[in-house]
Amino acid sequence: MRTPLIAANWKMHKTTAQTREFIMEFLPLVKDLSDVEIVIAPPFTSLAVAAKFLKGSNVKLAAQDLFWEDEGAYTGEISGPMLKDVECSYVIVGHSERRQYFAETDETVNRKIGAAQRSGLGVIFCIGETLQEREDGRTLDVLKRQLTEGLRDLSPDGIVIAYEPVWAIGTGRTATPEQAQEAHSFIRQQISEMYGQGVAEGMRILYGGSVKPDNISALMRMPDLDGALVGGASLKPDSFAKIVRYREV
Ligand code: PEP
């Protein structure tokens, strides 16, 4: 049985005061839940304050990125040990916005995943095709390349995959549950070829792309969907709580 994981990716939103306010409002809305893993990824500047207010709760902390070295002359970068220091459990790696705006490649994503594993962080590893790639019929080839290159020479320890079709991120255009299931089942098959069936059966595969309170339950009914990575709809406590409580929607 895979425990569902629902993660909030706040991107470049919220000051420390807004982070604290969100957490104070959000925790009472979900505190009775024990059958879903809940994760929040605020910006770096809010991690320490979030760690303080999440302490002892059923909500875990994630960062949105990390650098592949642990320490050194890399101005502006944040390392795995630094994220552990502020009590992160997970880090998001390879988000399409990082690939698009910050020139991340499969190779840098691979180095970052390795660094996260070295630090004992769980990894939410994002993959997904662009609209052009989907229209050209290349979706499965792209997913296969991102998986094999991103995980090259790495163990599957602590990895959670997030399938995020780029055309569905922040656009209001969600993949249908069937489109998502097709991609997820392909991803699980690839993981099985890379690491064996036991690992594939245990690995969680999240869906991301315009997830909202009114589409989460249909998505979660798909057999290979094990949770969601949520951007825009995770910024308000009541909206994110409804998504986390998808079984009741
Ligand atoms: C994301 O940023 O990972 C995401 C899925 O964003 P949104 O939910 O806003 O589409």
Image (cartoon, rainbow, N blue to C red):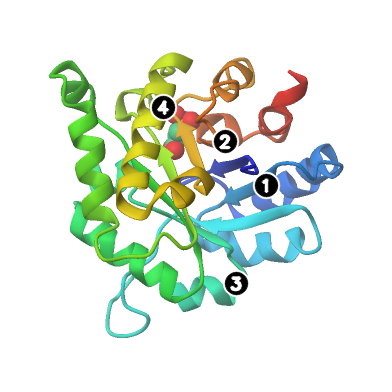
Q: Is residue 176 visible?
A: no
Spatial CA distance of label 1 from label 4 is 23 Å
The amino acid pointed to by label 1 is Glu
Q: Identify the residue position indicated by label 4 in the image.
A: 170
Q: Identify the residue position indicated by label 3 in the image.
A: 86
Secondary structure at numbered mark 4: loop
Is ligand 1 less than 8 Å from the beta carbon at label 1? Answer: no
The amino acid pointed to by label 2 is Gly
Do residues under tags 2 and 4 come within 8 Å of each other at their CB atoms? no
Q: Looking at the figure, which quarter contains the C terminus?
A: top right
Q: Earlier in the sequence, mark 1 or mark 3?
A: 1
**Residue at image location 43% in from the left, 46% down from the top:** 197
The answer to whether residue 51 is above or below residue 183 is: below
Do residues under tags 1 and 3 come within 8 Å of each other at their CB atoms? no
Q: Identify the residue position indicated by label 2 in the image.
A: 227
Spatial CA distance of label 1 from label 3 is 19 Å
Spatial CA distance of label 4 from label 3 is 28 Å
Secondary structure at numbered mark 1: strand
Q: Earlier in the sequence, mark 2 or mark 3?
A: 3
Q: Looking at the figure, which quarter contains the N terminus?
A: top right
Q: Earlier in the sequence, mark 4 or mark 3?
A: 3
Q: Position of residue 86 (x, y in %)?
A: 60, 72
Q: Earlier in the sequence, mark 1 or mark 2?
A: 1
- Judged left or right of residue 141, residue 52 is right
